[in-house]
Image (spheres, rainbow, N blue to C red):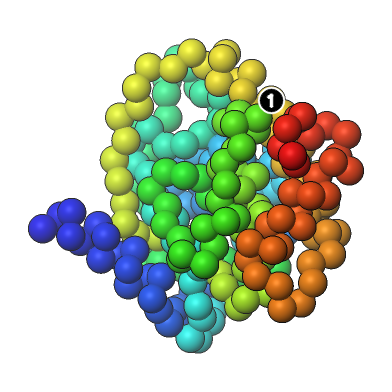
């Protein structure tokens, strides 16, 4: 029964419509880790942004991406893990808004990963995971998806289903090496995506091809991503 409940949660959110709470980040970004207890900045959230938000509401919204919360050992970045290595973060609770679920305002960016996350079939091309991006492949791809979603009236939902993670052993310094590019460039990449011209009426695949075709403009972009 629990397995059915898990997938039913995703199906219910993604088939909508959703009426309820919406969050808007003061810095233009929302960190879902700010809803965990204790708070744990999610991997991918820019270090130069403030994780403060305000609440609004929506009626009959359409959800394109549904991100469930991770309890226990959440998906935090390697820097945070190094800082808390003596007393690792152990999430044991969530903000009540996560229990009811909410969407993110289309003018606010958020971060989702490939863990406990589902999306509608139409958005699948946006979630390509180039290995050259290291441990930011899912973060960058989620930003590409979010660039396309407002054009289609789709929002990101955070909430249930919840999962409990017991993380397998990692070499944190190796993780840092794989995250360094993303940590330095995530804000820049998101701003660049906003400047990419996307033709009205083109398909998701066409828009993704346009974005990848223009990535050669970014001097820091690893070789092979746009080929």
Which residue is located at x 59 percent, y 31 percent?
Answer: 131
Location of residue 137 by image quarter: top right
* Figure quadrant of the N terminus: bottom left
Which residue is outermost to the left?
Answer: 1
Residue that carries the numbered disc 1 in the rendered image: 180
Which residue is located at x 77 percent, y 57 percent?
Answer: 210
Is residue 78 placed above or below 151 in the rendered structure? above
Whether residue 120 sits left or right of residue 192 in the image: it is left
Expressed as whole percent of the image width and height from the top left, the position of residue 176 reads: 61, 20
Which residue is located at x 29 percent, y 65 percent?
Answer: 9
Asked if residue 182 shows in the view, the reply is yes
**Around disc 1, counting alpha carbons within 10 Å, would you say few (fewer than 14), some (14 to 19), or many (20 or more)?**
some
* Figure quadrant of the C terminus: top right
Which residue is located at x 74 percent, y 49 percent?
Answer: 212
Expressed as whole percent of the image width and height from the top left, the position of residue 118 reads: 42, 57
Figure label count? 1
Expressed as whole percent of the image width and height from the top left, the position of residue 156 reads: 53, 64
The foreground one among 68 and 40 is 68
Which residue is outermost to the bottom?
Answer: 59
């Amino acid at each position: 029964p629990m397995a059915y409940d898990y997938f039913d949660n995703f199906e219910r959110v993604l088939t909508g419509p959703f009426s309820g709470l919406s969050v808007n980040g003061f810095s233009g970004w929302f960190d879902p880790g700010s809803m965990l207890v204790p708070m744990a900045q999610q991997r991918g959230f820019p270090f130069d942004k403030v994780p403060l938000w305000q609440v609004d509401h929506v009626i009959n919204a359409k959800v394109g991406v549904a991100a469930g919360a991770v309890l226990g050992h959440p998906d935090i970045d390697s820097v945070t893990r190094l800082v808390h290595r003596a007393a690792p973060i152990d999430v044991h609770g969530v903000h009540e808004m996560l229990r009811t679920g909410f969407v993110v305002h289309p003018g606010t960016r958020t971060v989702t990963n490939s863990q406990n996350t589902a999306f509608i079939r139409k958005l699948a091309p946006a979630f390509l995971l180039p290995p050259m991006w290291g441990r930011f492949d899912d973060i960058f791809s989620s930003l590409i998806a979010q660039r396309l979603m407002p054009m289609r009236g789709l929002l990101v939902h955070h909430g249930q289903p919840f999962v409990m993670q017991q993380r397998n052993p990692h070499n944190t310094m190796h993780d840092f090496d794989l995250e360094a590019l993303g940590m330095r460039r995530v804000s820049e990449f998101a701003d660049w995506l906003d400047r990419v011209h996307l033709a009205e009426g083109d398909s998701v695949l066409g828009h993704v091809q346009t974005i990848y075709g223009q990535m050669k403009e970014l001097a820091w972009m690893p070789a092979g991503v746009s080929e």
